[in-house]
Amino acid sequence: MDATNALGWLAAELDARGWRTALRAGALTVTNPDAPRLTDAITCDGRAFWWTWGQEAGPADDIVGAADRIVHVLRTVAP
């Protein structure tokens, strides 16, 4: 799978959920709209999406699953 296209599809899925995204230089910056400090840049190697800390965020051919995981990790948690 083409990494740039996969990141674009992931951006579209997250945008549809109300999350902020920006695709620049091969990385998709994702920001929680309710807590802008909760942000990360997701990359793709054509096989998988990756967090900046090197852990896989999900397979590149599972856009919805990867979006679910990103939203889960960058969510706010009530005290």
Image (cartoon, rainbow, N blue to C red):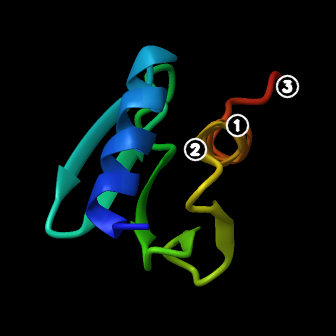
In x, y percent, where is residue 48?
58, 71
Nearest to the eye among marks 2 and 3: give it. Answer: 2
Which residue is disc 1 drawn over? 68
Contact between marks 2 and 1 (CB within 8 A): the answer is: no
Which residue is disc 3 drawn over? 79
In x, y percent, where is residue 66?
64, 49
Q: Residues within 10 Å of mark 3 (few under 14, many from 20)?
A: few
State left or right for residue 33 relative to residue 48: left
Mark 2 residue type: Ile
The answer to which of 42 and 6 lies nearer the viewer is 6
The first of marks 2 and 3 along the sequence is 2
Which SS class for mark 2?
helix
Which residue is disc 2 drawn over? 63
What residue is drawn where x is 74% and y is 39%? 72
State left or right for residue 5 relative to residue 72: left
Q: Residue furthest bottom?
A: 54
Mark 3 residue type: Pro
What residue is drawn where x is 44% and y is 16%? 16
- Residue 79 vs 63, above or below: the answer is above
The first of marks 2 and 1 along the sequence is 2
